[in-house]
Amino acid sequence: MKTKWKISPYLYLLPALVIVIAFRLIPIVMSFILSFFDWSLQGTGRFIGLENYSKMLQDSVFWQSMGNTFWLVIILVPSTIVLSLLFAVLLNKIKYFKSLFRIVYFMPFVTSLVAVSIVWKLIFNEQTGLMNTFLGYIGISPQAWLSESRGIFLIMFENLGFDKLPQFFHGPSQALFAIIIMTVWKGLGYNTIIYLAGLQNISKVYYEAAEIDGAGKARQFWNVTVPLISPTTFYVLIMTTITTFQTFSQIYLMTDKGGPLNTTKLIVYYIYERGFDVLEMGYASAVALALFVLILMLTIFQRRVERHVNY
């Protein structure tokens, strides 16, 4: 039987398709083309081939921005996964007012990032911030949170008498660590709710069988909960990694152009700076393409890891 072709379904898809093409595909193609040009926002430029990519590989600020971004991902992603799962497990055990706690945990995620960044900038204020006030109560001297360029691990080990660490072990700057604290707090509610939904889909039969076999709460968590929650963990891992690489607003609002000493300058902020401050749109496009390739490679790697996920 011959199926009759109808145009009406495609007409329903057309508005979304136009938006995707206009605001996704065309900008990606244009960015790729501009990366081969010395292009300014005035719309004038000349073809320079691979010079932008050669310049990028020799740009120390680019590599510093990439290193800052990797520190952000390395610390933020595991912290988010562990804390989200912990809070989800605790919420799952609550019998009363569970919906109220869900709302409370989820509110930071739906709050404007601009408002959150301004509030946290006040919290990290050196003179009047709540963070230093709290540290004072527990006997720790005030910290220059958003203006300290030294690595957080170096500061910690200095207090223990180890002040000669290799550069690699200095860690992210204290200013970047403050950004990490704020970003983890901002996204914690969303990931907690995702984990909570995953926990509630686990049948109680598995826990009853484990309890009959003599497994305690700790073994039930590691041998039942963690394996069965692995699809949720995989989803949180991929989405958190991608969004972390795209961090921008809190750097723009909470720091002085990626300072101090470029230690909070992340790769997306560097793209914005080169494109809209320095007006090197071609070079900014080359850096953006490098970021695209990096995220694509990480996503492919994570998809290969997916084969070990229990669905």
Image (cartoon, rainbow, N blue to C red):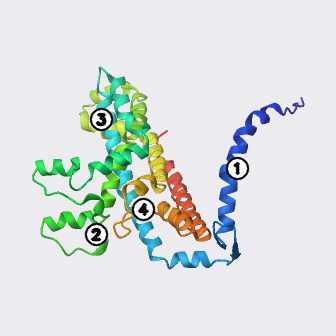
- The secondary structure type at the circle numbered 2 is helix
- The secondary structure type at the circle numbered 4 is helix
Residue assigned mark 1: 22
Residue assigned mark 4: 69
- What residue is shown at x 38% (from left), y 68% (from top)? 262
Q: What amino acid type is highlighted by mark number 3?
A: Gln
- What residue is shown at x 23% (from left), y 60% (from top)? 144
- The secondary structure type at the circle numbered 3 is helix
Q: CA distance from mark 2 to mark 4?
A: 16 Å
Q: What amino acid type is highlighted by mark number 2?
A: Phe
Q: Can you see residue 228? A: no
Nearer the observer, 12 or 182: 182
Quarter of the view holding residue 281:
bottom right
Q: What amino acid type is highlighted by mark number 1?
A: Ala
* Mark whose residue sits in front, 2 or 3: 2
Nearer the observer, 201 or 211: 201
Nearer the observer, 203 or 47: 47
* Mark whose residue sits in front, 2 or 4: 4
Which one is earlier in the sequence, the residue at label 1 or at label 2? 1
- Please provide percent x and percent y for residue 194: 43, 36
